[in-house]
Structures are given as structure tokens and as C-alpha cells.
Amino acid sequence: MSQQYGRDAVVLDRVNRGIIEQLQEDGRRSYAAIAKSVGLSEAAVRQRVQRLLEAGVMQVVAVTDPLTVGFNRQAMIGVRADGDLRRVADTLAALDEVEYVVVTAGRFDILVQVVCVDDEQLLRLLSDGIHAVDGVRDTETLVYLRLVKQTYSWGTR
């Protein structure tokens, strides 16, 4: 989910949190089932879900295992950058292979998670994409050997 600046804040009351948690358990859960769980009408749940989606609070997506759909190389790339980190991060986020970008404090300025078909595509991405971005000073690529855990059900606390 990309960060967009200037969005109106959505209040995460008990009901909105319940809706989000229901969808984290099963993104295909019906509005009727969610309504029963949170104590609202189906129409009210539909409206709340739409507001949460429009505000960027959540997304409802199909999550795949990249290996099973033909992407045989995943990596986390630590980027050290100069200049405006937000601009560099936004430019990196626009690259097709990039699925996750976060500006950090510590050893790296930006972390970029990528999914590629193979090592050749990763090499092209590094050479022609990431290293070509103005402000990228250097990178360290951590190639994934095995995905052990991936979860999106941390709740709303």
C-alpha cells in the first residue's frame, strides 16, 4: 500500500477495526457475514469498507506465492542515498519489479523488496533501474533463499 500525503484521516473505531480484522482473516468474507459479526447492516458495512479503501487504510488483494506464478527471484535491496529520500523512494517505487519500499533509519536509507522472473531480470533491474536513479549512492542485495513466513493478519491493535 503506497503512502499518499494529504488524505483525510479515517477514525478506526471498534466497528472499523472489526471490519478490518474480518477481512484480514478472509478477504472474500461477505458483507452480510461481516455485518453480523460487527453488529451493523450489510449496507453500512459496504459503506465503511468503501471509505476504508478510498482513504488507503486497507486494500483487499489476492496474495500469491511468487514462486508458484513464475517469479523465481526475490530480494531485499538496501539502498544508501543522497538528497531527498522521499523523491528517491518514490522513483524506486515506480519500478515495475518493486513491490515494497520503506524509508528507514539505520544502515540503509531505503529498503526495496523486489520480485523478478530470474537472476537476469534482477541484474537488469539493479543496473538499469535502481542504480540509474539519481541520488542512489550504493546498494546491498539480499537474495531470498526461502520464504518462511508471510502474514497480513496482525489485526488493528
Image (cartoon, grey):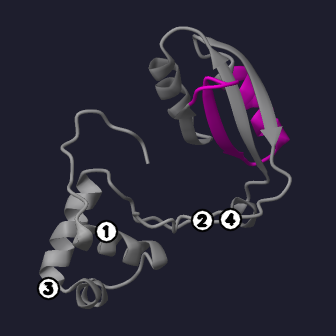
**26 left or right, relative to 75:** left
Give the SS element for disc 4: loop
Local packing at callout 3 (Cα closer than 10 Å; few below 14, some 14-19, many 20+) is: some
Q: Going 44% across and 48% down the picture, which residue do you hit?
A: 1
Task: Write down the residue under mark 2.
Answer: 151
- Magenta-colored span: 104-129
Q: Going 53% across and 64% down the picture, which residue do you hit?
A: 152
Query: Which corner quadrant holds the C terminus?
Result: bottom left
Local packing at callout 4 (Cα closer than 10 Å; few below 14, some 14-19, many 20+) is: few
Give the percent coordinates (x, y) of residue 96. 57, 39
Residue 150 in magenta stretch? no
**146 left or right, relative to 58:** right
Q: Earlier in the sequence, mark 3 or mark 1?
A: 1
Task: Write down the residue under mark 3.
Answer: 41
Which residue occupies the foreground of this view, 41 or 39? 39
Q: Between marks 3 and 1, how big is the CA–CA gap?
A: 16 Å
Residue 105 picture quarter: top right
The amino acid at mark 1 is Arg
Q: Going 72% across and 40% down the picture, which residue do you hit?
A: 76
Q: Between marks 1 and 4, how big is the CA–CA gap?
A: 27 Å
Give the percent coordinates (x, y) of residue 12. 25, 60
Q: Going 47% across and 27% down the picture, which residue do you hit?
A: 90
Task: Write down the residue under mark 4.
Answer: 65
The amino acid at mark 4 is Asp
Check residue 17 in the rendering and tell me which mark sits there, or answer none.
1
Placement of 90 over or under 19, stated as above or below: above
The amino acid at mark 2 is Thr
Q: How many marks?
A: 4
Query: Nearer the observer, disc 4 or disc 3?
Result: 3
